[in-house]
Amino acid sequence: MSQQYRSESSDMQLTERVVKIRRVTKVVKGGRRRGFSVMVVVGDGEGRVGMGLGKAFAVPDAVRKGVTIAKKNLVRVPLSGTTIPHQIMAKHCASLVLLKPAASGTGVIAGGAVRAVVEAAGIRDILTKSLGSANAINVVRATIQGLTQLKDPALEIAKRKGVSQS
């Protein structure tokens, strides 16, 4: 289900990854209209990641729309070497995601939807657990929400002291 594409962008290289493809049907007067809903995650592998949900009557069009939306929703993730600075738990709807830092060399211990987000962000060592609903869209949103809630300890201390970090 997971595919990787390489996007040529003027300012940065973004890796695109299709997380979920859903075929949706709308019943109308003349019959059924089939369309596709595609969840796409993009990231530069250096701490920036975004997600987009593209909808169209053909899969390639839905992927393209999803990538465009994901590029607009890029967020910065603070990294501590190859892992995250601290443990965090995030919730979106009924999906609950636990993200824990791991020792160097551990690798990415994660399920499909969480793995796509974490790898796109450039995190190499992390332990995760998806609790609650396994809906891929909500799991991705919970993961991104958790990654945005992470704080870089050095920056936080410098902010509290009123010192500029250089």
Image (tube, grey):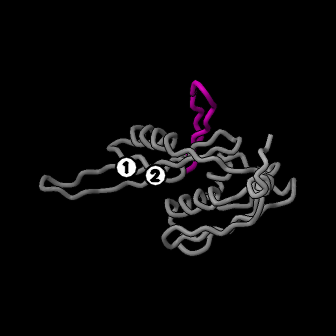
- Near-viewer residue (49 or 65): 49
Residue pictured at 78% horizontal, 52% vertical: 158
Mark 1 Cα shell of 10 Å, populated few (<14), some (14-19), many (≥20): some
Magenta stretch encompasses residue 153: no
Residue 148 lies, in percent from the top left, at 62, 56
Q: Is residue 85 left or right of residue 16?
A: right
Report the Cα–Cα distance between label 1 and label 2. 7 Å
Quadrant into which the C terminus falls = top right
- Can the viewer see residue 91 in this picture? yes
Residue 156 lies, in percent from the top left, at 75, 56
Cβ atoms at labels 1 and 2 below 8 Å apart? yes
Residue 56 lies, in percent from the top left, at 34, 44
Instruction: Return the residue found at the far left.
Output: 29
The boundaries of the magenta stretch are 1-17
The first of marks 1 and 2 along the sequence is 2
Q: Is residue 73 left or right of residue 46?
A: left
Residue pictured at 67% horizontal, 50% vertical: 77
Residue pictured at 64% horizontal, 60% vertical: 149
Q: Element at badge 2?
A: strand
Residue to which mark 2 is pinned: 21
What count of labels does the image hold? 2
Q: Is residue 32 placed above or below 142 in the rendered structure?
A: above
Q: Which circle marks residue 63 in the picture? A: none
Q: Is residue 133 placed above or below 34 in the rendered structure?
A: below
Residue to which mark 1 is pinned: 36
Residue pictured at 61% horizontal, 73% vertical: 131
